[in-house]
Structures are given as structure tokens and as C-alpha cells.
Image (cartoon, rainbow, N blue to C red):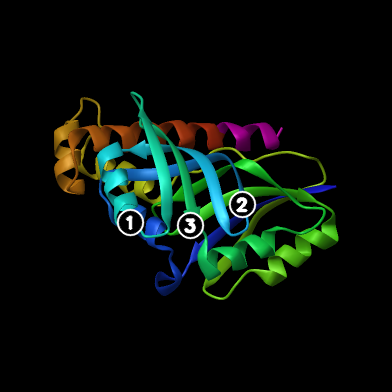
Amino acid sequence: MKSMGIELEYALEALPPLHAGICESPDIDREIIVGGRAIDGIETITSFVYGDSEAYASLLEDLEAVREYDITTTDDGFFCYLRRDLGADGLSLLNALAQETVVVVPPIEVGSDRTIRLTLVGHPSALTTVVEEVPDGIRLDVQWVSDEVTVSGPAVTERQTAALRTARDVGYYEIPREAGIETVAAELDCAVSTASELLRRGEANAVERALEGDRSSR
């Protein structure tokens, strides 16, 4: 068996409505799908979303495909239970991933940069079929391949990278600090709580990736 980490990037015109809403909202950073299944064209998932629950709920209310949802808020974001109709585009992607010997390993990261990052485990030939059968309008990039059954670490999202770069540019990381989180939020045109969350998650993910790279080089 092999493991493969992939990144799917939607073309703007192919982006599903809910994913488009995540990308457009300044109050939602990313969604982590921790479990789910699809039966007869209906997808049921549980996810954790880093962002504002009311902003996300407003997206769901506007979508006819949504059958039901339930949201539970936490300090960092919220959990969401969601049932929705997949539609033709969603079924095409699902069929590409649903090879007989391939397992999609949670978590699945839905980013605000039009990407989905996930890990697949299966026979090499079946993983190759996944790469070949991804629908039009989606770019697939193989991030890594391993001969072992494993999963990838968290990625620094595009919005987190933008927040980190903005914080650096305004002097947030200078010693002594030249600007506070309020300045970062103003530059990003978002709430202070959102800017703080973006920096905190971005810093944590960047550190984790750096340490992973250090371990792999030893």
C-alpha cells in the first residue's frame, strides 16, 4: 500500500457554492471535515470550521442543496453536522476518489484559497487512477507519496500566509513590537478576533511544518 497527499484546486468557475462562500467570507478561515459518507447522492459530513458560526450558517441558508444542519460553537470555531445533495459536480469528484482499493483518510481540509487537501491510501494503480480521473475544472497536485500508511501535517493556508505576511510588514513581529493586532486586522479588513485566529493558526501550522522538515532531514 502507498499513501499520497494531494491538493485539489478548483477553477473559479467550477467552485461549488459553499466552498465559494468560504473563500469570499472574511469571517471564515477553513473547514476541516473529520468524517462523512455519501449514499444515493446525499452527503452527510461532520466538520470543524475555524471562523464565525453565523457567517457559515448564512451560507447554508442560501443553498437549496442543504437538507439539514446543526452547529455547536466552541472557543476556536464550531462543529457542524451537514446533510446535502451532492449534485453532478460533487458526484464526479466522489467517483474519482471512490476507487475500489482507495481510502480517503480524514481530516479533509477545505481552504479559503479554493483548495481541498486530503490523504489517500491504497494500491499504487488505484491512486494513479484517482489522479487521471479528477473532473475538469479541478487541478490536482500530488504533495507527497509514501510507501507507508501515513497522513500529512497541517498546511498553512493562503489566508494564514497573507495574515502572517501582513503582520510582518506592519511590524507586529518586530522587537519591540511596532504594531498591535488591531493594525493587522485593519490591514486585512477583518475583525480583530479573526486576525488573531489567522495568526495563531498560521504560526502553529508553520512551526509544525518546520519541525516536520527538520525531522525528515535527520
* Quadrant where the image shows the C terminus: top right
Q: Position of residue 168 (x, y in %)?
A: 28, 41
- Residue 155 appears anywhere in the view: yes
Residue underneath mark 1: 21
Q: In this picture, which residue range is highlighted in magenta?
A: 211-218
Q: CA distance from mark 3 to mark 1?
A: 13 Å
Q: Earlier in the sequence, mark 2 or mark 1?
A: 1
Q: Position of residue 17 (x, y in %)?
A: 38, 62
Under circle 2, the secondary element is: strand
* 154 on left or right of 179: right
- Quadrant of the rendered image containing residue 177: top left
Number of the front mark, 3 or 2: 2
Residue 76 lies, with reference to residue 186, above or below; the image says above
Q: Amino acid at mark 1?
A: Gly
* Residue at x 41%, y 57% (from the top left corner): 19
Q: Position of residue 154 (x, y in %)?
A: 53, 39
